[in-house]
Amino acid sequence: MTDDERDDRAIARALGMENEPSSPDAEADAYREVLAHLSDEVAPPAGLQDRVVEAALARRPAATTAISGAARRRRTRARVAAMSAAVAVAAGVVIAVLIANSASTTKPANRVEPIAVSRDDVAALATRPGARTGTLSNGLGHVVIAADGQGYVYDLTRSDPVAVWVDAGSRRTRLGSAAPQGGILGFRVGHPDDVTGVEVTTTNGSELGRAPLTAP
Amino acid sequence: MREVWGAHAGAVYGLAMRVLNNASMAEEVTQDVFVRLWEDPARFDAARGSLRSFLLAMTHSRAVERVRAEASVRRRHEAAGREPVVANDDPAHVVASSEARAAVQRALCELPDDQRLAIEMAYYEGLSYREVADALGEAEGTVKYRIRTGMRKMRAALQAAEVSP
């Protein structure tokens, strides 16, 4: 085989004309590096990062269940609970890291943070100067938002994924959705002073509860 | 993962948009690529190349699969009038280029039209050597020569950019 023929095959693999070889192909990899610099970068639409996180989360718990399924009967409840908590916290941390990045590329920096926090964290936030609180209708739970934009929906009576929205004047903005951790869902808004209320809906937008925020 | 999304989401989405020319499908491909990385990060082998190259190869594969599945290659090709695709340089959407990317793109722009067109048809439209040759009414060997020559020039430009301080 000539050099030209070798290059033609490597380029064909890099361009996706041929299936991925089973063994590493240094020449094709080198041409893939070239192609990786060919296209312009385009800022992804706002909200895509949230959807990626939701999709990743939706798959990760399923994988965990499948792995543990056969052995579940042999395990104690305590071990399963500990594992679930560890997975939930780990997932929450990763998601928070993923979502936090969107703050630099989207306006405003609005997002939901499904991080495991305690009721003490909520109480501490509520006592900060400038923090505002509200009670969600339909007995769904409560809301607190601090002056720096950090907020929690807490005492939630639902454990399935819900979406959090904020009202700001005539605008209603969806921050994202996630499953509450221990009845608490964290969120962050870029312009907390503009927020007049918080709403919680199902993930497809059906209203569950709404809370006007009281003045500090 | 924060760094991965921040560093590569624009490139992944940009390539998906370029191949698919459809925002909704590009979003789906972008989501698919990052979720797959999330599920199985061990698939990336740093010894074989950069993470960007790995992600974009996966993006290209997924996007081309979509294009082929919808049997839209020929319609898109005819709609494009077989002209080289103009890069999207809308300042509202384009993120600043790296030196390496600028060098490769400069090399692409400096290629003769027949080389650039053949590469763009193969890469962005997912066509094989034979399909590019048929579309252009050229011999397959001619198309291979054009793509090979153009790719070698861009590879040399990338290597020079990586060596430069």
Image (cartoon, coloured by chain):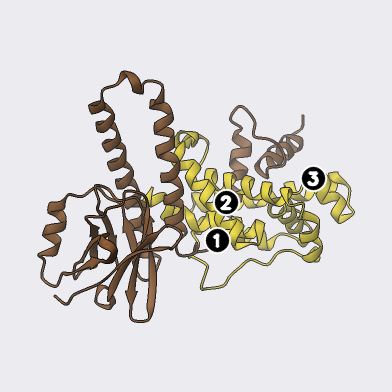
> Could you say where residue A133 lies in the image, as x and y percent from the top left?
18, 68
> Could you say where residue A216 lies in the image, as x and y percent from the top left?
13, 75
Q: Of marks 2 and 3, which one's residue comes earlier in the chain?
A: 2
Residue at the image point whose x is 52% and y is 36% from the top? B48
Q: Are marks 2 and 1 on the same chain?
A: yes
**Vertical placement of residue A167 versus B11, above or below:** below
Amino acid beneath label 3: Tyr
Q: Quadrant of residue B72?
A: bottom right
Q: Mark 3 belongs to which subunit?
A: B
Gap between marks 3 and 1, in whole Å? 27 Å
Quick one: SS at disc 3?
helix
Nearer to us in this view, B57 or A214: A214
Assign the C terminus of chain B to one quadrant of the image. Answer: bottom left
Give left or right: position of A132 versus A113.
Answer: left
Q: Are marks 2 and 1 in contact (CB under 8 Å)?
A: no
Residue at the image point whose x is 67% and y is 63% from the top? B109
> Could you say where residue A64 lies in the image, as x and y percent from the top left?
39, 33
Disc 2 target residue: B29
| Chain letter for the brown part | A
Quick one: SS at disc 2?
helix
Disc 1 target residue: B102
Give left or right: position of B160 versus A69.
Answer: right
- Circle 1 packing at 10 Å, graded few (<14), some (14-19), many (20+), is some
Nearer to us in this view, A49 or A144: A144
Disc 3 target residue: B129
Gap between marks 2 and 3, in whole Å? 25 Å
Nearer to us in this view, B61 or A143: A143
Q: Are marks 3 and 1 in contact (CB under 8 Å)?
A: no
